[in-house]
Amino acid sequence: MTMAVPKADKLGVSVTREPSLMTGAVPSKSWMDTPVEFKPGNFCYPAKKSIVEYHKFPNPRDWEPVADDWKLPANWKDIILQGIKERLDKFRSFKIFMDCCVRCGACADKCHFFLGTGDPKNMPVMRAELLRSIYRNNFTTAGKILGKLAGGREMTFGVLKEWFMYFYQCTECRRCSVFCPYGIDTAEITMMGRELLHLVGVNINWILEPAANSNRTGNHMGLQPHTIKDNIGYLCDDIEEITGVKITPTFNRKGAEILFITPSADIFAEPGIYTAMGYLLLFEHLGLDYTWSTYASEGGNFGLFTNNEMMKKLNGKMYAEAKRLGVKWILGGECGHMWRVIHQYMDTMNGPADFLEQPTSPITGTRFENAASTKMVHISEFTADLIKHKKLKLDPSRNNHRIVTFHDSCNPARAMGLIEEPREVIKAAANNFFEMPANTIREQTFCCGSGTGLNTDEIMELRMRAGLPRANAVQYVHDKHKVNTLACVCAIDRATLTSLMNYWVPGVEVCGVSELVGNALVMDGEKERETGLRFEPLAGEGE
Amino acid sequence: MKFADFLVEKEGGILEAWVDQVLGQYSAAAVPFFKNGKDRFANPLGHTLRQGLGDLFTAVHAGGDVQAMTVALERILLLRAVEELAPSQALAFVFGLKQAVQAQLKGVEVVDLVTAWPGFEQHVESLALLAFDLYMACRERLYQTRINELKSGRYILSDGAVCPSALMRKEMRKEQETAMALQTMSNSCTQEAR
């Protein structure tokens, strides 16, 4: 990093001829000839050797992205090309996405990583081109004959480095695919890119270690059954202190009507625990016949960020546990990518779940037609239905200390179309709700900037840049309406948006939608509430 | 023309040159978008820079009110502080204002330039000092954000280093090793006693 010489007339010229500060890319050259440069802060730490061994993944070793030698297998190029071939044969979507882009550029300025870094290889079209160029060169007639003229290029170590950098600067949020006239799903291209990198042992620890934990103990954090039970017990103690209501949930109970599965962060990390307290209060309010599981104790699925086999394996625990316990259907908590896996992949990966019944609300009798196949209902759908049928006693004034806006979490919004339900819930549970600008919410929502396993602190600056578009929209409603609460339905969001707000918009707290419900619920036999679920004073109290 | 009038008349040109300097630090492929993207929510980076530099110019021109300069600077520096720039690179844009003004002075007769320039320069220098403070505040806010993330337990969302079952195994191994070491010591003491 060199010191700046404040000669403005030269400054503008020199910097455009020097490598990009972020990636080392030199703008004056063609993108194919601009190498990436790894340096602390622009990459995630590689997976530990022991973790790669645990997964029985190829090429476990200690290696450094900044090194010239990544200790790749001697035949790594063949492995990659063979990997592409297998995937082209196996996944029709991958083949189509490799073929059908016309480079119209509609996606170019829609990616939060591009908007925050200005790095052209973060334009979705370019990110895809990193892989598509290899596809053209080796798997199309034009590319085999014309090579670079047909947009093809050789698979080299430099290309592999580009893949590692840019497939880990994509959160698979799929905002770009909303704007693509062909519906190209760049997330699936990133997924293929990451799968291919795994074949030669190039991967990151922040994803593989939680995946190992999930495989071993059922959840990212490696929580064992007694820890899960104890933690939920502590949350119940807090609930009793705040509301005077004693809740005694059940675990692994056979014969329960409903199995409830949520991200493990909801029972272990702030601010997710307040969301979990909301679930506990809601179920108690209804007298719901449900059980928690210490086996299927994770809604999230870091397999989605790894490869399709891992995703299938980790997801398999949900149906396996539902079958073991003999429940009728599954209710799912507030999680982001969990719902992409459930909505788009679970049925074909691990279904059909013909041992379950089509979910029906025991309170309202509503049959959830949309969940007829997966047998799994989102907590916001479930709650919105209760509200619609006036089955909840809510006092929204208990959330008067909160001026709320709603962040549509990428996966629930774009992968399952969960748009209105959380809004209906918020409006019933809180009196002050303001939307962010239209092009930053609903299907066009901006990612938190840290999804798909990129919520690791060694890339904190990069995360803040990628989260700029989201933070910028929150800043707007914070300034205009004094918004102080950013509600969402995703565990990763609850963690990462909190950091994003701490940096960009201090004064805005992040909460789950169910936390607002928990605050507002009027429970039988409760005492007068003096605080909210995070022991914060209510409006008019302690001010 | 007096210098104060010149700043008013040439505000558009000065600002444009200043924005161009700062945007010039980004990849050439991104500059047209950052420069021309009009929607503040679709182009937050370009908008933040343009708006911030504009407000800053107005504040300097109006006499260098610290409060006004602070507000304008903060939005820009929050951005600059996470861009992997050396501190000098991150703050160079402040001095760029002088260059932008000088470029517009070419061919314009400003009668009080000699007497007015030192005052203007002083405002820019004050701006630079203020920018130092705010840049550091932004970096410290970032570090605090990292610390908060660690403290809240959010980091264990996916960091297996603190996996409770792994910790328990580690603890058990350590206890076993200690027990074995004690056993060995006790054996050797017994042998020596014999």
Image: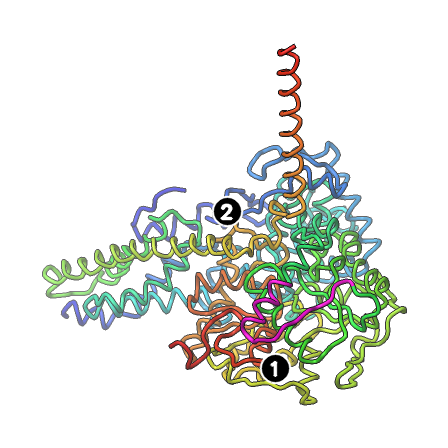
- Tell me the magenta residue range: A233-252
| Relative to A192, residue A202 above or below | above
Quarter of the N terminus of chain B within the rendering: bottom left
Quadrant location of residue B70? bottom left
Q: What amino acid does circle 2 point to? A: Gly
- Residue holding disc 2: A41
| Relative to B182, residue A339 above or below | below
Label 2's element? loop
- Chain letter of the residue beneath label 1 in the structure image: A
Residue A112 visible, this orientation: no
Q: Report the residue at 66% width, 38% height from top.
A: B172
Q: Where residue A216 sits: x, y (%)?
A: 74, 48
Residue at the far front in the pictured view: B194
| Relative to A264, residue A197 above or below | above
- Camera-side residue of B110 and A534: A534
Q: Report the residue at 59% width, 66% height from top.
A: A237
Query: Is B190 left or right of A482, judged from the image as shown?
Result: right
- Residue holding disc 1: A525
Q: Give the label, 1 or 2, closer to the camera.
A: 1
Q: Report the residue at 14% width, 69% height from top.
A: B2
Number of numbered labels in the structure image: 2
Residue B32 lies within the magenta run: no
Residue A194 visible, this orientation: yes
Mark closest to the chain's N terminus, 1 or 2: 2
- Camera-side residue of A266 and A250: A250
Tell me if mark 2 has few (under 14), some (14-19) or many (20+) residues whose alpha carbon lies within 10 angstroms of its own.
some
Residue A242 lies within the magenta run: yes
- Camera-side residue of A481 and B131: A481
Q: What amino acid does circle 1 point to? A: Gly
